[in-house]
Image (cartoon, rainbow, N blue to C red):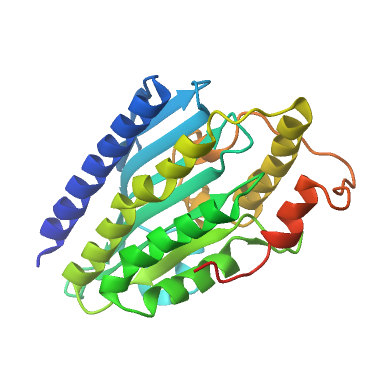
Amino acid sequence: MTYNKKIQQVRSFLVNLQNEIVHAIEIVDKNNFLNDSWQRQEGGGGTTCILENGKIFERAGIGFSHVKGAKLPRSATQLRPELENRQWEALGVSLVFHPHNPFVPTVHMNVRFFIASKAEKEDIWWFGGGIDLTPYYPFKEDVIHFHQSLKNTLTPFGSELYQTFKNQCDDYFFLKHRNEPRGVGGIFYDDFSEKDFEFSFKLTQAVGKNLLNAYLPIVQKRKDTNFTVQQKDFQLYRRSRYVEFNLLQDRGTLFGIQSKGRVESILMSMPPLVKWSYDWSPQKNSPESDLYENFLIKKDWV
């Protein structure tokens, strides 16, 4: 398959995926996204869709980008010197939904495709992606549903993939400086080019399409739960971990900044309200301690 045909197939899927998710969330939230299209000076562009202060979501952001360049930033070539001096294109859809209600978890998803080319050399390409869940007041049945949905999606592509991708997610979304997971995990994969382009692309399509199945049933079940000021306060405190991870560890954020991407779109994943409390710890036998003791642990959920 030619370089351009690969690009067009992936682009078409990602644009449609963004539109489908935006449409579904607008129905659930009963509010519309702002669509902000942009161009990147070095090449390419994208569309950032953002919903703020909705009925359910304090911020819901989903962005499509298709960017290109003549030379990759150091974050991409440091571990892969074969990528140096190649022109490149990167396409992806990335989303983060931050709910008002602390009983509804935050969700993150990203699916992406990267291709680097050089005259008279074979293209280097791969897919990456994942979905992970960050609850504040979690329910075991919700976490099991989320992970079971991911396992069901991946099993047709290989019985071992869910466990492999789950382990990679647990390792990736771990705040080293806090020595704690960001949430209850999910799946994460990168540099994926198994078998051939069609196989890897179909797997990534399945992951992207599964977001609504994995997440919306939890939203519908928990969105009308009554909560206190103290519980909202705890949600804002836990959101600070999200900010710390994105700014200190996330490779996608680092790549976006180093490749001179659009900062507003790169940082749309940030929650609108956050707080830090000095040396805070939960009271024993409290709902807050339940999160730390029974959910922010490496565990097989299904």
Residue in the image at 56% along x and 71% along y: 300
Q: To which quarter of the image does residue 72 belong?
A: bottom left
Task: Answer with left or right where residue 278 lies relative to residue 233.
Answer: right
Q: In this view, does 189 lie to the left or right of 46?
A: right
Pinpoint residue 12: horizontal percent, then vertical percent: 17, 46
Q: Foreground: 278 or 21?
A: 21
Viewer-proximal residue among 227 and 187: 227
State the image coordinates of residue 46 (x, y, percent, origin top left): 32, 37
In the displayed structure image, the side of residue 264 where residue 70 appears, left or right:
left
> Can the viewer see residue 117?
no
Q: Identify the residue at horizontal 85%, vertical 39% (top origin).
A: 277
Identify the residue at horizontal 28%, vertical 62% (top origin).
115
101 versus 253 height, above or below: above
Q: Nearer the viewer, residue 223 or 8?
A: 223
Residue 18 to residue 190: above or below: above
- Picture coordinates of residue 156 (x, y %)? 26, 72
